[in-house]
Each structure stands twice: as C-alpha cells, then as structure tokens.
Amino acid sequence: MENEMKIPNHVAIIVDGNGRWATEKSMSRSKGHEAGFLNLQKLTAYMYSRGVKCVSAYLFSTENFKRSETEVNFIMNLLTGKLKEILEFCHKQQIHAIFSGRKDKLSNKVIAAMNKIEEETSKYNDRYFNICFNYGGRAEIIDATKKIVSDVNEGKLDIDELNEDIYENYLYHKLPAVDLMIRTSGEQRISNFLLWQCSYAEFYFVNTYFPDFKADDFELALESYNKRDRRFGGINYDKKSN
Ligand code: IPE
Ligand code: IPE
Ligand code: MG
C-alpha cells in the first residue's frame, strides 16, 4: 500500500507555533524557535527520504519585523550562529539550499551566511530546500513585476509575449508548483506565503505546534494528500459522479 502512495514533488510548510509551544512550557519564545530549528532539520530529512524533491519552509515573513527586537535578533542569529550546522546538514542530505525573500533590512552578516549556504550547496541538483526568509508572497510578485517592467523598458522583453511561464522566470526562483502546503499550530490561513506557487496546492492544517510535528504527523499529511482529488479545474471522468 505504502508503495502506491503519491508523493508530492514540492511540499511547502508554514513553520508555526514555536512561540506558543515554548510559552505553554513556561519557556521563552526563543526556546521555541530553537526547538523549531532542530525539528526542521529532522522533518525535512524525513520528507526527502520519502521522495519529496523540493521543500519550501517559511521561517521569517516580511511582517515578522513587527515583533520585538529581541525575538527578531534571535531568529536572525539562528541563521548566522548555526551556519556550520546548517552546512553540515545540507551536505549530509545533499540538499541545494536557496533563499527566497527581500535582502533589505537584513544585516550583512545574515546576507553573507545566506550566500555561503547557497554557494556551497549549488552542486546538488536533486533535492531543493527553499528557505523563505524575510519573505512575503505579495513582495515577491511586486519584485517580479518591477523586473518585468524594467526588462520591457530596456527592450529585453516584449510585453505581448508575457505569460505565466515567463512570469515565473522573474520570481525569486523558478520552482515547481507547490503540491502540498502544510501549516502547523491550528491557524488556517496562508499569511502571505507563496501566493503564486500555491495556486493549486492542497492545503493541510494541523493543530500540532511545529516543534512537535514529526515524521508520523507528516505521514498523516501524506495520507490526507492521497485522498484529494486534484482536478485543476477539469473533471475526472473516471470517477463516479452523483
Ligand atoms: C513561527 O512560530 C516562527 C515565526 C513566525 C518566526 P511563531 O513565532 O509564529 O509561533 P506562535 O505562532 O507565536 O506560537
Ligand atoms: C507566518 O506565521 C510566518 C512564518 C511562519 C514565518 P505568523 O505567526 O507570522 O503568522 P500570523 O501572524 O499568525 O498570520
Ligand atoms: Mg505564529
């Protein structure tokens, strides 16, 4: 039965509930982010082992700058402070890590860490890890549109040629469409994540806080995904209709 399972090619995950996980344990929110960071490594390794080729993880949104300086700094420092660990993980799993998001408002140290991770892992071309950091779906669409206008003005692009496939060349990365979008922590909203890429994604919402979302929970998400009838606007005529 397991062999017959359909495995989503691109899984996107909104890593949510780190703060509440920690608060309910009378710990600081930072401890929750640390636990989330550790869990992300285990979970993504499991997803790749199940045959997923691309994982997108939402780790910091353009709106998350509204949080306290202490919390924002802690999350930024996770990326720079755990750089060695992140690189070891990517090499062990043979993952090509890429970043999506705006670079403005990020320190030079954070940008340098991102560049190093991208450069060092660029040799891997089977598994992709799209890390969405200072990311916003609307910002991505605006940034793409600006680049398109600039190319049209410079005569590099004929506006009449613009279609969805070409538009995707202007996004942060040209990635396959998201098949399965998971959000932990009980919230049932997209919070500005991969708006373009999720147009036909299957959504899976679960109450578990992200640090507790393990391999078994992912299996339940896969089971749910396998029960979905993905029609993409068409009709599956081989299914009985009533
Ligand atoms: C997700 O956990 C991580 C980030 C958004 C940075 P939260 O920090 O949003 O945790 P909750 O939702 O407050 O519990
Ligand atoms: C979305 O979670 C952003 C990330 C997980 C990075 P939030 O916790 O920021 O979203 P809202 O505020 O509940 O919508
Ligand atoms: Mg949250």
Image: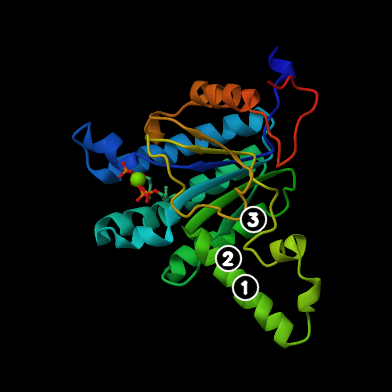
Query: Mark 3 or mark 1: which comes first in sequence?
Result: 3
Residue at image point 40% right, 39% down: 36
Q: If the image is split into quadrants, where does the N terminus sit?
A: top right
Q: Quadrant of residue 69?
A: bottom left
Q: Quadrant of ligand 1?
A: top left
Cα–Cα span, label 2 and label 1? 6 Å
Q: Is residue 46 left or right of residue 125?
A: left
Q: How many marks?
A: 3
Position in image of residue 47 (x %, y %)? 60, 32
Q: Are marks 3 and 1 in contact (CB under 8 Å)?
A: no
Asked if disc 2 is less than 8 Å from ligand 2, the answer is: no
Nearer mark to the viewer, of 3 and 1: 1
The picture places residue 115, in percent across and down from the top left corner, at 57, 63
> Residue tagged by mark 3?
120
Outermost residue to the left: 26
Q: Secondary structure at mark 2?
A: helix
Instruction: List the residue tagged with mark 1.
Output: 145
